[in-house]
Image (cartoon, grey):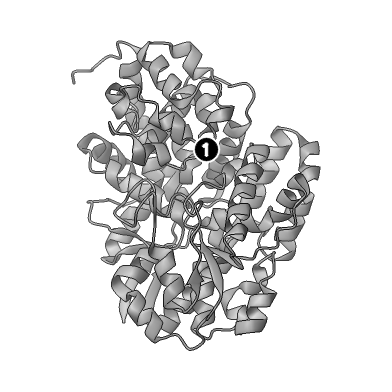
Amino acid sequence: MEKTLAKDFASEVSQVPGGEGVYMCMQCGTCTASCPSAEIWEYTPSEVIAMVKADMRDEVLSSSSMWRCLSCYFCTVRCPRDVEPTSLFHALESLAVKHGYKPKGTTTPVVYDNFVKSIKSNGRVSEFRMMLGYYLSTNPFAALGMTSVALKLLSHGRMPLSARKIKGKKDLDLIIKKLNEIRGDQ
Amino acid sequence: MKSYTYFPGCSSEATAVGLDISTRAIAEALGIELKELEDWNCCGSTPYGSLDELEAIAVAARNLALAEKTKLDLVTPCSSCFVTLNKARVHMMKPEVKSKVNQALATAGLEYNGSVKVRLLIEVLMSDMTTQKIAAKVVKPLSGLKVAPYSGCQEVRPRFGFDDPENPIALDEIVEAVGAIAVPYASKCKCCGGSAVISEQDLCLQLMYDLFKNAVESGAECMITPCPLCQMNLDAYQAKVNSKFNTNFNLPVLFVTQLIGLALGLKEDKLGLNKNIVKPNKILAKYL
């Protein structure tokens, strides 16, 4: 089978599901103007897209910027060029993870990692285990500041401590394993 | 009676158990049959796709394949499940994604052919049930109750064919159908911060403060939302907002399904209202 090799960073991004729209950006800045978290991005949303197109692979993938995305999708519905920036930032996150980049200044990747671990162990997310895993791998003392919220959820029957395992957990394992085999072949 | 395959989502078993309880209760009262999808798994939500988009699509697609066998529309009350399952559905229209994911699904004896409709409960209530029919079943009109309808983000964005992403009106129409007043306010579809409340708490508390301030200044006595994450944030973190900003917000945040249930004459425990942290006692005293 003929393969298309990634020539530059933008084409690499465009091959990740969600990253297809990168070439369409015209730098109007609507995404940045619409972003509720733009003030804490290392580079603003539109800057990140410009950097992808300028082939600044290392700077983008090592940045914490895209990890600040709240997935509110305001940029996506407002973008006049259908770039779908939200999905593009998720594609950048997945490339950063794949290539072992560890962004400084944000622990959001640790939240996501614990979330996915919870799915992979049981087939469903246990919010309690996800939070516990997050605080143990970041700052266990910060968990103290969360006790008031956690106790409220617990006392209202909203934070079961045990995780519920689905019957098809083995099926889910097989699906994930097979997908990675297929992907590895290509 | 119209039947649907029901996808509760993981939060329905924990932080948003009140959403699941009230959804099932109003479905029964309105004559809608919800058959829970057998052995569903987590949709993957935003985090899975952020770490590994293709794997996330495969995990979500197990649900689509299971749902396809039921030949019914797949209905979820959760905004995030709605978006995530729809995104996977759209990705599965691409031949190269579909081929890889279906090869993976085959190891579990499953296949997804692309026929499932993923729908949000609110949209089903609006389109199939209609607000007229809901209004006709109201036994306790919530007359005079001022409600701030809060859609949050993923009920209306990205656009999967439901409501306006900048100025949504579905929740307003439901509020009016149950006899209450939908107060107009600017923040009805702004972001509460979602799951970032864990890792970006300062930012999220600021976003929530803006929402509360705007809703209260518009005269709201409570907020309603369909979203499990929004409800959890606005309910469980309201005290944190108060201590950070030196405010005294005491705004009950109900699931839209709980509001509908009250008007249908269902009792507090049938709607999971005892699970709410900011107690809606004033409302209950007036209308229950």
- The answer to whether residue B22 is visible is no
A73 relative to B219, above or below: above
Residue type at mark 1: give it.
Answer: Pro
Q: Which residue is mark 1?
A: A36
- The outermost residue toward the bottom is B139
Residue that sits furthest to the left in the current view? A2
Q: Chain of mark 1?
A: A
Residue A66 image position (x, y, % from top left): 50, 28
Quadrant location, the N terminus of chain B: bottom left
Image quadrant in which you'd find residue B36? bottom left
Of residues A16 and A64, the one nearer the viewer is A64
Q: Can you give x and y, in whole percent of width and height, for residue B171 in the image? A: 43, 65
- In this view of the protein, which residue sits in the foreground, A38 or A59? A38
**Residue B231 position by quadrant:** bottom right
Side of B283 relative to A49 (left or right): right
Q: Does residue B77 appear in the picture of this structure?
A: yes
Q: Position of residue B202 (x, y in %)?
A: 68, 38
Residue found at x 27% / y 50%: B111
Question: What percent of the width, then of the height, locates residue A166?
Answer: 50, 57
Q: Nearer the viewer, residue B257 or B138?
A: B138
Element assignment for label 1: loop
